[in-house]
Amino acid sequence: MKATLSLLIVLLLLCDSRISVAGPFIPSRCVIYAPQFRQLTDTAKGTLFLRQQGIWGDLSKGFNSAGDRFYWSISTGGLIQFVEWENAMLYLVGDYEMAADQHSDIYFHPRGIFWTEGVMFGTKIGNTEFHTGYINRCHHDIDNLENNIVGAGEQRTLIYSSLLARSLWRDVTVAGIRSDLAAQFDYYVFKQDYLTPVPKELPKTDAERIIASISGSAKFDLVHIGDAVGYARLNGEVTAFNRFETSTVDGRVEIGIQFFGEASAMNVYLGFESLQDDFSRPIPMNSHFVYLGFRFLGRNIAL
């Protein structure tokens, strides 16, 4: 109990808007990937193939982000399970996020896309789940070369791929609240950061100097409203750059209502995020913004 309470306090501190934040941009930071393992009541035995798949999607509208970079954010992700055993699985996971400002005739001007894909192995011991694998992450620009009032001609192409290990605890109790918790460690093995124009001084968060990161995520069911649940989501991340000479903190928090269906869940939420380097501009800019959003989740793959 003390450990889970400490995690909650740390995550709350990481989401404090007074903290200068930065770190690797991960589209799935708004969910907890949690593919279902074989249930005790399942009559299936032995090795099974291609038994599970699912998707999630997210649309949010940001307010007062720097340059209105997150005026719109559209994310989606999914999972395909290759093979399943009684307490283990091998699966493919991927997601992307497209960020857009409003500087066009239709108030929708795509700026860049963050893309990830990887292969993961998952197993469980008791109520603790362990996942490990390799994730490729990259960023590519879309309309940044157009002449507009925000970052005309800017480009930033990134690769920041990692070997990762993740632990997950679902349906646990924290201070009397039903909760889902996750912790993750990433060690970055492929790193490229192409900046146009090249600044006089490289940012401290230059992706070619990223080393490792530790992140934590949590979802707390605060109050039941009929068949729905009022919840809070938290995400915090600590990242090391440049031989551990630079360390940064990233944070995100949201509150919302979750509606449950047989196969999917739907979130309607209000959130806050604070970014110093959103991994999209040659010169990092602080950005503290509120957002409204809508999300759907395949209940077999994400919490």
Image (tube, rainbow, N blue to C red):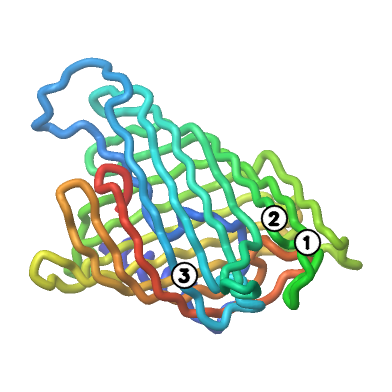
Q: Sequence-wise, which precedes: disc 3 or disc 1?
A: 1
Amino acid, disc 2: Asp
Amino acid, disc 3: Arg
Q: Name the front one of labels 1 and 2.
A: 1
Residue plotted at (48% across, 60% down): 74
Judge left or right: residue 69 versus residue 79. Answer: right
Q: CA distance from mark 1 to mark 2?
A: 9 Å
For label 3, the crowd category at 10 Å Cα-Cα, with few meaning under 14, some 14 to 19 and many 20 or more, is many
Give the vertical position of 70 relative to 215 (above or below). Answer: below
Amino acid, disc 1: Leu
Disc 3 secondary structure class: strand
Q: Are marks 3 and 1 in contact (CB under 8 Å)?
A: no
Q: Residue furthest right?
A: 200
Q: CA distance from mark 3 to mark 2?
A: 24 Å
Judge left or right: residue 238 versus residue 235. Answer: right
Disc 1 target residue: 145
Disc 1 secondary structure class: loop
Residue 163: x and y in percent read 56, 38
Residue plotted at (57% across, 63% down): 99
